[in-house]
Amino acid sequence: MAHSAVPQPFRASRPAAPLSGTHRVPGDKSISHRALMFGALAVGTTEITGLLEGEDVLRTAAAMRQLGAVVEQTGPGAWRVAGRGVGGLVEPADVLDMGNSGTAARLLCGLLAGHPIFAVMTGDASLRKRPMLRVTEPLSTSGASFWMRQGGRLPLAVRGAVEPLPLDYRLPVASAQVKSACLLAGLCARGTTRVIEPEPTRDHTENMLRHFGATVRVEDTPQGRLIELEGQPELVAAPILVPGDPSSAAFLLAAALLVPGSRVTVANVGLNPLRTGLFETLREMGARLTVTNARTEGGEPVGDLTAEYGPLRAVEVPPGRAPSMIDEYPILAVVAATAQGTTRMRGLQELRVKESDRLAATAAMLAANGVGAEIAGDDLIVRGGEAGIPGGGTVATHMDHRLAMSGLVMGLAARAPVAVDDAAFIETSFPGFAALLNAACGAAAIEPT
């Protein structure tokens, strides 16, 4: 399951024909991680359908096994988790390796903080650079102890609280991972855990807590959005149908918007309003983006999305939208390169602590391919226009799967092919990415070099 140490360079060229057809993308990564974790904390057996089987999620499955849950695959995307109940996880015999997944690592900190066990967690070279203090600081007030490397980085050791205290925490920055870690720790505490977030972030944790029978209250207050969780609930196993990941669908839909004559439908995509900032922004740019077959499954809104090629105009993206599209800025920047005028994306400081400094890397990706791009403070400015994307450059991915996928989509729309220095990491979140895009193109537009 480890990444290959040998880089896998790829190249994308303009396809001979427009993109077409109806396609499915892998299951939502955020929901897949949580399905395995809540299944492990529930009483009974949780049946999961549509689980993302990328490396990040498989790391979470392995960690839940190490913590005493029975986790087994029963078919493609079909998994079964026999849980141990809230507070019932056992001490792992070995180090928990979370690979490339920041979500898994941060949520697991919350899970471990509420259990009276000792555990050590590590990850790959990219994850070992990412800050963990933002989670461990609030979790320490529950009674858990953490030891980390300089700068709050993995490897990390945790001794969970024997009698965890409920948390009362106001997030300094909007982060679904920090919020979720606090709620996971609060599950094991007597009393009510309260978390206030300055901007609403993805609420898959709250939705799934309710789905498993916990009492969760949410209200908007002058200080921000308040989430209250009643501690020590009995979580009862419940089936979960994981929708297609909107962050993954974004790449296929963007490709259709950029390649003349294209029309593509992505079926069964999660449309949680706290995840659809990109789709809202694309519509503001004039994108032909429509939803059909809208429905609710497992507490989450789902639908089929169709994107059609057409002219686009530049927009200003407000900073308040960042939490609902934090993973989509690299692909939005590629789309903006073809729009009429100058697009400004505001308030992207959170991108500096993703898999890479995603803000600097996105600007560099555009510049390497002849697109005018600059960073002003925490804003990304992209100059689009008639010229479109010259291409011909190489994208430095910095072990970041979203940069790699954005670079390859850019190659489909550019005048000269675009190279990506390493596409190995795409498998962590979007297994079969190149094959799916090639199928939509009807030919091999994306190839290893």
Image (cartoon, rainbow, N blue to C red):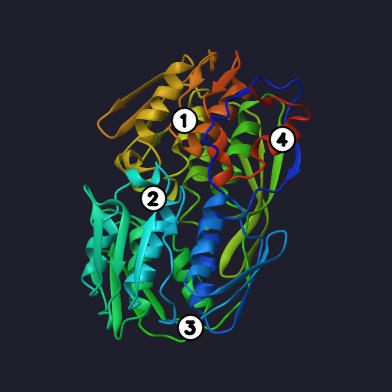
Where in the figure is residue 103, as x and y percent of width and height? 43, 55
Instruction: Indicate the secondary structure of the residue bearing disc 4.
Output: strand
Q: CA distance from mark 1 to mark 3?
A: 41 Å
Q: Is residue 265 left or right of residue 160?
A: right
- Say whether disc 4 or disc 2 marks the residue closer to the N-terminus: 4
Disc 3 residue type? Gly
Give the residue at mark 1. Answer: 397
Q: CA distance from mark 2 to mark 3?
A: 31 Å
Q: Residue at x 46, y 36 (%)?
A: 399
Q: Is label 2 in contact with label 1 (beta carbons under 8 Å)?
A: no
Q: Looking at the rendered structure, which numbered label has been put on residue 323?
A: 2
- Say whether disc 1 or disc 4 marks the residue closer to the N-terminus: 4
Disc 2 residue type? Pro
| Image vertical order of residue 448 relative to residue 92, above or below | above
Q: Between label 1 and label 4, give the one nearer the viewer.
A: 1
- Say whether disc 1 or disc 3 marks the residue closer to the N-terminus: 3
Q: Residues within 10 Å of mark 4 (few under 14, many from 20)?
A: many
Instruction: Indicate the secondary structure of the residue bearing disc 2.
Output: helix
Instruction: Indicate the secondary structure of the residue bearing disc 1.
Output: loop
Who is closer to the viewer here, 361 or 412? 361
Q: Residue at x 47, y 74 (%)?
A: 209
Give the residue at mark 4. Answer: 263
Q: Between label 2 and label 1, give the one nearer the viewer.
A: 1
Q: Between label 2 and label 3, give the one nearer the viewer.
A: 3
Could you tell me if residue 375 is visible in this image? yes
| Image vertical order of residue 422 relative to residue 388, above or below | below
Q: CA distance from mark 3 to mark 4?
A: 47 Å
- Say whether disc 3 or disc 4 marks the residue closer to the N-terminus: 3
Give the residue at mark 3. Answer: 85
Quadrant housing residue 187: bottom left
Q: CA distance from mark 1 to mark 4?
A: 28 Å
Where in the figure is residue 50, as x and y percent of width and height? 66, 60
